[in-house]
Amino acid sequence: MSGFASALDIAKDIAAGKLSAREAAQAALARVAALNPKLNAFTLVTSERALKEAAAVDAARARGEKLPPLAGVPYAVKNLYDIEGVVTLAGSRIEASKPPAARDATAIFRLAKAGAVLVGALNMDEYAYGFVTENSHYGVTRNPHDPSRICGGSSGGSAASVASGMVPLALGSDTNGSIRVPAAFCGIFGLKPTYGRLSRAGAYPFAASLDHVGNFARSVADLVACYDAMQGPDERDPVCRQGPAEPVSPQLARGIEDLRVAVAGGYFAPENAELKEILDRAAKALKASRQVEIPEAGRARASAFLITAAEGGMLHLADLKTRAAEFDPATRGRLIAGALIPAAWVIAAQRFRSWYHDRVLALFRETDIILAPCAPDVAPPIGQESMEIGGVSVNLRANLGLYTQPLSFIGLPIVAAPIARSGGLPLGIQIIAAPWREDLALRAAYALERDGIAAAPIPTL
Amino acid sequence: MGQEFDAERFAAEAAAALGLPIASGDMPGVAHNLERIASLARQVMAFELPEETEPAPVFRP
């Protein structure tokens, strides 16, 4: 079985008896065994659980039961998700000494209920504080399209596992761009839903007022099937939306005739010619009629940076006091600095967030979708410390979230979509909608995919 | 603030208030990060907001 079969095709074949869930799980485990030594995406392979979950699907089918939507579909999760009986690492060495999780994270619990089969946990930047997945404890995760380059972060293992075809679905988390940046670098689709849409219970936090969970796939239909399966209220996450799930799958093929599409100008207008070209192509395909200016995006990014640093630093303060040397050198200085930020700066950033939120939401009275670049360039080589943006050399780690950070700052739902290219490394765009309108962004992504504008390239590994 | 912000001195004093020891080897990284944070904070603090603008710790549409 090809590693690039879609999740929905696998589920269909299993439901039809053309493939057993056990065969699908074994094939995924074999691909992980073959490819992971080259890419270092997995930090744990849960073979026993995978085969047990697959056996349950096969048994249900043998009994003649109607199978749930993702029955037998292999998937993997960023290693900050709680997996029952497994120690949740969140990319750190410190957490490795903690007890195993007593229960699955809500997202995993719901995917298990939908029949999906968990094959393992995936590498990330320590405590999700980074965009590179160059982890000093667990190694660097390599980009399937060029293993000498990074796959982005912090959900780097998640993106690499899907882009390489090891699994069709993976879960990640996004505080400032940690789903969207790796999706762009690895040429796959990523969804960062509205803040509060999906339960974060059992996902190790980073900056609670900005944390989102979300997912990756190679097609929009797969992305949506996984997203729909995770929706619904959850008393374990105080931020999680009350009220019933709003499944998008039935809406996907509705087309885009009724959608007003705009392109973000100013701060978001890329100087990079390749980025400009893919953005223009997507805008044309979606019949974008105008440009909008997202006001004060630079200040929004600065505010998100302050809140992230302060909340992240505070979260780890106890460990910073007693075992600072065990942190990844890449995150240690940032977390300590974050813990020391004066309260006035953080509260000012939160007040600005309120102002900015109102201004940006006003734009959605006149448009349904806003398009913007995703990562500022193609994936950089491993170990690179600076990059050029607009002809100026800037710190790489601090700037990979240039286009993503001002948008997650106010929780907007965003699809990261890879734009098909005739050569070169993957590049992606952000398809942005108003809060709680994931359906619109996903319909636009689906239309781009249908027209051949958006597609996940198959790497030659 | 501005030119006279001494990140190392600030870090040492604020860390003492929190009871957070900073290893000497970590201090340059901490100071470097604080300088970046301070420069971002200047951008945020320079933006005048109406008094009635409340913080948005939780995003509500």
Image (cartoon, grey):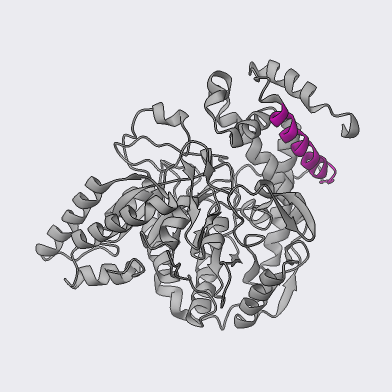
Q: Is residue A112 left or right of residue A277?
A: left
Determine whether A140 is above or below A23 in the image. Answer: above
* Residue A266, picture quadrant: bottom right
Asked whether residue A400 appears in the rendered view, the answer is yes
* Residue A294, picture quadrant: bottom right
Determine whether A135 is above or below A117 in the image. Answer: above
Taking the magenta stretch, the answer to whether it contains residue B34 is yes
The secondary structure that dominates the magenta segment is helix
Nearer to me, A50 or A349: A50
Residue A169's spot in the image, x, y percent? 38, 60
Asked whether residue A244 appears in the rendered view, the answer is no
Determine whether A319 is above or below A8 in the image. Answer: above
Residue A183's spot in the image, x, y percent? 52, 60
Residue A418's spot in the image, x, y percent? 54, 69
Q: Is residue A160 left or right of residue A318?
A: left
Q: Residue at x 69, y 55 (%)?
A: A402
Q: Residue at x 81, y 44 (%)?
A: B43
Q: Quadrant of the C terminus of chain A?
A: bottom left
Residue A405's spot in the image, x, y percent? 65, 52
Taking the magenta stretch, the answer to whether it contains residue A446 is no
Q: Residue at x 39, y 62 (%)?
A: A228
Span of residues in magenta: B28-49
Taking the view exactly as shown, the residue that stands out farthest to the right is B3
Nearer to me, A176 or A93: A93
- In this rendering, the count of numbered labels is 0
Q: Quadrant of the N terminus of chain A?
A: bottom left
* Residue B55, picture quadrant: top right
Nearer to me, A179 or A60: A179
Taking the view exactly as shown, the residue that stands out farthest to the left is A63
